[in-house]
Amino acid sequence: MIVPMHKFSFLVFHQDYSDFLEKVQEIGVVHLIEKQDEVSDEILEKYDLISNIQSVVKQLTKRGVEEKKPQKDPDGRQAFEEVSALYQKLEEKFQQLTLLQKEISHVRPWGDFSKKTLEKLAEEGLHVRFFTSPTSRFKEDWKKEYPVEVIGNHAGQVYFILIQKGEEEPEIDADEIRAPETSVSELIHYENELKKELEEINRELDAHAAKSLGAIKKYGYQIKESVDYQKVVENTDKQADEKVMLLEGWVPDEKKDDLIAYLEKNNILYVAQKAVQEDKAPILLKNKKFAKKFEMLGDLYSLPKYTELDLTPFFAPFYMLFFGFCLGDAGYGILMGAAALLLKKKVRKEMKQIMGLIFYLGVSTFVFGIISGVFFGIPLFETGLPVYKDLAARFEQQGTDINMLLFYLSLVLGGIQILFGLVLKAINETRQFGWKHAVGTAGWIVLITGGVSLYAISELAEIPFADLNPALYTLLGVSGVMILLLNNMNRNILMNFGIGLWNTYNMVTGILGDLLSYIRLFALGISSAILGFVFNSLAVEMSGSIPVISVLVMIVILVIGHGINLFMSGLGAFVHPMRLTFVEFYKNAGFSGGGKRYNPFKKIT
């Protein structure tokens, strides 16, 4: 759900304004209403600095060095500047090393030589020229006709030199290259020196990662606080010849009590009013334990508008089911659930929610694995196990199998989610614009549910569908009036009819396409099971017959194969249900989004 917001307007005497801002920042519940479209150059510079600090923190964290509590807290700014300089130096040294290694690869085929010897030969009028030629084009006769010496062969090329006196051009069909400036031994010496310098820089960075990381983070928070404070000052309206300061912001309903207590205790004039539809209030979500795990998925698309429904608790159960449907292996579900439970106690606080999400997805994967009869790629319906053996025999008698049932199940789940989305759309329209705007959507709900109900009655009660024609015509008449004539009761009927026809075309073609999209659940589940089965077959066929070694080979193939399958199928099971959520479900639920996250002005150090 979206937490209700109140808009606060504060009027503060200018001499008390600084103390007021410090206290409001300490309370930390006011989301500033920004009135300026552009921020100052000073704030932009600080944003760049914050970005650089975050980059340095990320790089130091990646080094994987255990943090140590120093006896004296280092200066965060000084440490940041030192680390930034070290990383810049590290980048320069890496570039030098890359160029040097290219030069070594160019010089290495010529071996080691003395530059002084070449210079002495030049003084005597003897010029040493360097050539390369593909092995197929090199002619041994060149050695007889000219003073040619082959230095070596490398990567299908012959490297040779020609010692020439005078300016007569030899008839040699080869590529002449520039003479190496430095011998390979000197270049390797420089390379080793550069590597030592890189090692020293990395040691210094590791030391900073151990002792200065916390100080650099704190420095970043201080800059962020100063930016927030400056933004508040810049978005303050100065009234009464700058004697009175007017500040406006949003405060969640559940967090306003402490703020109000401070304001009344210090006799600060304020006005508080509940957010209305026209306001662009920030979004703070508050969901229960299960749905909260799925908030991070909704954030990948967009936050809802303040007046919309928060769809997180409504798509969460579907997403969980769809993930399990796509992966559909009981063994993989056990692995995911166990890994999530073990890692939840060890990971950072911000990762615990992800581990909780993985656990729920693992449970769904296990359940659908049991339903589809797949355990680490083993088709349980073919194993002769008691329950699965009886079910397989029953399916065979009815001329079907588990895969056909799963195919229909994917369509049924899709139809349920689409219909559920339409119900939410009607609720959304009623909340935002009134019930008169939701009549058309309600008409579609009546038509779809009524049509499905009549078909079910005909099939289950064995009543000929023709006998249900009166009910069908009544259903078509009522829903048709709602869809075509009363879709928006604030417009005239003729306009409603034209728009209703267009909406009907879009709805019929859209729902059919949306429903077919859910077949991907079945397809992904089948592909995951087939890949698991293929890796099992490979493990058996390639293990050989040597007693101990065959078992080891089989285990290696199974671990690698199922690891690949779990990663690839898990990725598909993550992405495709998300697509069904953000495209099919959000569209049918009438979700528009575009909300701005609640970000209070508060202290973070």
Image (cartoon, rainbow, N blue to C red):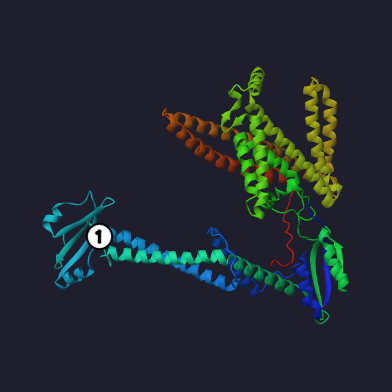
The residue shown at (73%, 74%) is 234
Task: Give the residue furthest to the left.
Answer: 144
The residue shown at (72%, 44%) is 316
Q: Is residue 89 above or below residue 592?
A: below
Task: Give the residue furthest to the bottom.
Answer: 241
The C terminus lies in quadrant: bottom right
Q: Quadrant of residue 571?
A: top right
The residue shown at (40%, 64%) is 195
- Given residues 10 and 462, the one toward you in this image is 10
From the viewer's perspective, is 519 left or right of 502? left
Q: Quadrant of residue 392?
A: top right
Q: How many marks?
A: 1
Percent coordinates x, y for residue 192 in the rendering:
36, 64
Percent coordinates x, y for residue 95 in the rendering:
42, 65
Which secondary structure, mark 1? loop
What residue is shown with label 1? 111
From the viewer's perspective, is 343 left or right of 246? left
- Given residues 502 and 276, the one toward you in this image is 276
Task: Give the residue furthest to the front.
Answer: 71
Q: Mark yes or no: residue 513 visible.
A: no
Specify the amino acid type for callout 1: Gly
Percent coordinates x, y for residue 238 in the rendering:
79, 77
